[in-house]
Image (cartoon, grey):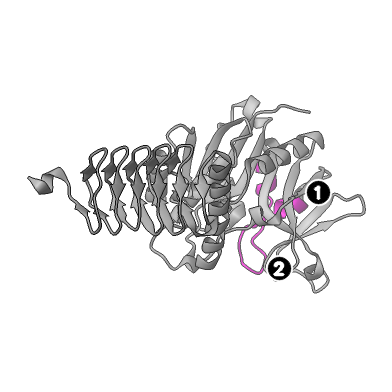
Amino acid sequence: MSERPLSAVVLAAGEGTRMRSTRPKPLHLLCGRAMLLYVLDALAECDTRRAVIVVGHGAERVTKKLQEEAPDLVLDFVEQHVQRGTGDAASVGLTVFPDDDLDEEDGDVLVLPGDTPLLRPETVAALVATHRQAEAACTLLTARLDDPTGYGRVLRGKDGRVHRVVEEGDASDDERQIDEVNTSIYCFRRSLLAPALRRLSPENAQGEYYLTDVVEVLHQAGYPVVAMVAADARETQGVNDRVQLAEAEAELRRRTNERWLRLGVTMLDPERTYIDATVQLAPDVTLFPGTLLQGRCIIGAGAELGPDTRLVDCVVGARSVVEHSVGRLAEVGEDSVVGPFAVLEPGSTVPSSTRSGPFYTATSTEDQG
């Protein structure tokens, strides 16, 4: 299997009007993290040399957030000033790559949308492996859906290879019956992608440059185009509105809870336990129903939290108990019992081996002074 250099272009320029929010779509939070960060996580099992983020709406906010939250990643940012479709966005992304780098020119490039937070690293790695084993010009990640409404349909030839992708607005009645859909996740030979993008036309129902049209351009030029069907269609689904955001949140929370359960954390009712992806839990922590841990919480070994407790950016020492209480930016020492119905205000500290009693309010040392 070829080991060509691999890069990634993440398309995150869309305004996301269906979110009905002033927050840029890529920055909507899922389990306490920006949605776009999960897409970058999906590159973890690939030897990706660089990732280019195509920004547009809220470009400065998106760039700043990623630089703050993903400082260990090598990221380049380029702005798509006018939204003219995914094909144009991919072209903008490729402008970051130097024309005189022959090694990179012969490499592969992943192109992913910035709104697929459920995508798993092993799926992306399998896509790259499929692409290289087939020596393909383009490999699509596809999915089979019971209801493919709204998605571009994948048209295959008798040889099983992909001939083209047709968007629903341009599809015939027969083509709309196809249940295999394009997920907008691709792996391309970079030396073939750029010239193919230059051949795109906006003559379609949306008047945009479709990245999907590159499939037909490459096929007609005689290059092999293949597809890999995702084992779990759910992980390829995009987030376009608040309903889909909530569905993605539920799945990510399920994955988060499962991971902590396997690492030695007890949850009496995982469906009523909410843990942000940024939280740290030690073994033998017990979480009772209605517990919400958000932000940068750090919970020590053997601590018991809940029921009905919400902590944000708090530290709880080993073997402490916090029940029916709320806290933000506070610290509880080891072997303490806090609550029920305690309030831990920002900057407050509960000393080790303290029993607060009910209706306790902890204030910061500045407030006490």
For residue 348, which quarter of the picture?
A: top left
Q: Name the residue under label 2.
A: 168
Distance Cα–Cα, label 1 vs label 2: 20 Å
Q: Label 1 neighbourhood size at 10 Å, few (<14), some (14-19), many (20+)?
A: some
The amino acid pointed to by label 1 is His
- Quadrant in which the C terminus is drawn: top left
Q: Which of 208 and 69 is in front in this view?
A: 69
Whichever of callouts 1 and 2 sits on the residue coming sooner in the sequence is: 2
Q: Where is residue 26 in the image (x, y as percent from the top left)?
A: 48, 53
Seen as rendered, the residue at the extreme right is 158
- Residue at x 74% of width, y 44% of height: 138
Q: Residue 131 carries which label?
A: none
What is the x, y in percent for residue 364? 17, 46
Nearest the camera: 216 or 202? 216
x, y percent for residue 279:
43, 44
Numbered disc in front, either 1 or 2: 2
Residue at the extreme left? 369
- Is residue 92 visible in the rendered image? The answer is no
Residue 68 position in % (x across, y down): 38, 40
Question: Disc 1 designates what residue?
Answer: 219
Q: Is residue 127 magenta?
A: no
Give, as a three-letter code, the residue at label 2: Glu
Snapshot quadrant of residue 176: bottom right
The secondary element bearing badge 2 is classed as: helix
Question: Crowdedness of circle 2 by 10 Å Cα count: few (<14), some, many (20+)?
Answer: some
Q: State the SS at label 1.
A: helix
- Bounds of the magenta segment: 194-216
Which residue shows up at 47% across the image and 54% down it? 274
In reply to whether residue 201 is colored magenta, the answer given is yes
Residue furthest to the bottom: 173
